[in-house]
Image (cartoon, helix red, strand yellow):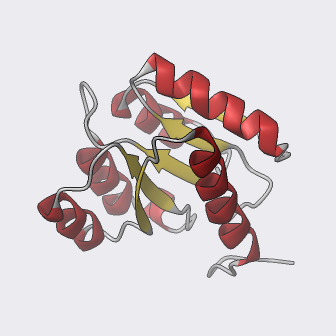
Amino acid sequence: MNKGGPIIIIEDDIDDQEMLSEVFSDLSFKNEIIFFADGEKALEYLTDTSIEPFIIFSDINMPKLNGMELREKIHQNEDLRIKSIPYLFFSTSAEQQSVVDAYSKSVQGFFVKPTNYQEIKDTIKTIVDYWNKCVSPNYVK
């Protein structure tokens, strides 16, 4: 896991992108924040670049390649899998079957987007702080 790498956010809703951009700006993390509006563009980036992202925040319902399909493709790609990039769902709802499906695909977290700005900020801070403290298989100090 590359703790200094970019944080990838896959979100097709422009308003949510703007709000998350503001949250990350307020939190002042040093990581670059990269947004993708669909899973296909995110997968292209992940497979075509040597950059190792720190965390992937993904919505579930997106055009072209949804979050579940993207997670499956990342998990099946050995080059991406060995990078140990935490893949988290950050979605407006959590139907039980979606949660079960997500964890069956080895997702590292499933979070429902809070409706309150401060709660979103607190949730993002908790997630990023947790992964900053976490040791992964390819961690080199």
Question: Closest to the observer: 131 or 14?
Answer: 14
Q: Is residue 21 visible?
A: yes
Q: Quadrant of residue 12?
A: top left
Residue at the image point whose x is 57% and y is 64% from the top: 83
Whether residue 54 is visible here, answered yes or no, is: no
Residue 43, above or below 82: above
The residue at 37%/66% (across/down) is 107
**Residue at the top extreme of this rendering:** 14
Report which quarter residue 38 is drawn in.
top left
Q: Is residue 64 above or below residue 59?
A: above
**Residue sitting at x 60%, y 34%:** 20
What x and y, as percent, mark residue 117? 60, 39
Residue 62 % position (x, y): 28, 31
Quick one: quadrant of the C terminus? bottom right
Left-right relation of 6 to 102: right
Instruction: Give the quadrant of the N terminus.
Output: bottom right
Where residue 41 sits: x, y (%)? Answer: 43, 27
Q: Residue at x 27, y 63 (%)?
A: 102
In the rendered picture of this protein, how many numbered marks are placed on residues? Answer: 0
The spot of residue 3 in percent (x, y) is 76, 61
